[in-house]
Amino acid sequence: MIGAAHAGWRGAFGGVCGNTVAAMEDLGGSRDNIVAAIGPCIGQASYEVDDGFYLRFLAECDANERFFKPGRKGHYQFDLPAFVAADLAAAGVRHVEITGADTYADPERYFSYRRATQEGFPDNGRQMSLIAL
């Protein structure tokens, strides 16, 4: 069985990881046997967020502070891959791999919506994923 989910900050914050694990379990999978991979995504060094974003995560759980590093005044650097990995672990997934590829920092290999927006690109990027068993 293979499950795939997109977990940007909204989805991850909203529980997409736990919901995906639950759906796999409903189909006969076992949390003990799930292996998760967090593919290329924006890395912490590239992911600047404001106070409001930071406070939203802290309001949910004080322990979420560990996913933020101080940035320039009134801003933080958010670690999305670590947040997703912790969410998967909380859902009972014991083996989680993080590729570490930063989509924002590598324009030759990856599209980044944030980079495109900041650079004023007129069009959206295209993305494809392949999962095989």
Image: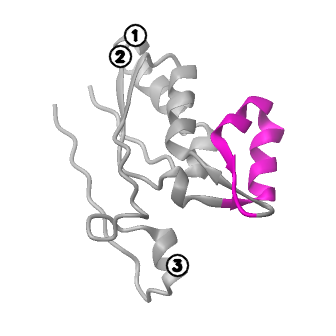
From the viewer's perspective, is residue 39 above or below residue 133? below
Q: Which residue is mark 1?
A: 32
Q: Amino acid at mark 1?
A: Asp
- Judging depth in this view, the residue of 1 and 90 nearest the camera is 90
Identified at 50% across, 87% down, the residue is 120
- Among numbered discs 2 and 3, the one appearing first in the sequence: 2
Q: Which residue is mark 2?
A: 29
Q: Residues within 10 Å of mark 1 (few under 14, many from 20)?
A: few
Q: Which residue is mark 3?
A: 117
Q: Residues within 10 Å of mark 2 (few under 14, many from 20)?
A: some
Identified at 42% across, 18% down, the residue is 25
How many angstroms separate mark 1 from mark 3 (CA)?
40 Å
Q: Quadrant of the N terminus?
A: top left
Q: Which residues are magenta?
A: 49-72
> Position of 54 compared to 106: left or right?
right
Identified at 50% across, 27% down, the residue is 88
Q: Is residue 22 magenta?
A: no
How many angstroms separate mark 2 from mark 3 (CA)?
39 Å
> Position of 130 compared to 27: left or right?
left
For the residues bearing labels 2 and 3, Cβ distance under 8 angstroms: no
Residue 9's spot in the image, x, y percent? 59, 50
Q: Is residue 71 magenta?
A: yes
Residue 132's spot in the image, x, y percent? 17, 37
Residue 72's spot in the image, x, y percent? 72, 63
Q: Amino acid at mark 2?
A: Gly
User: Which image quarter: residue 50?
Assistant: bottom right
For the residues bearing labels 1 and 3, Cβ distance under 8 angstroms: no
From the viewer's perspective, is residue 34 above or below residue 37? above
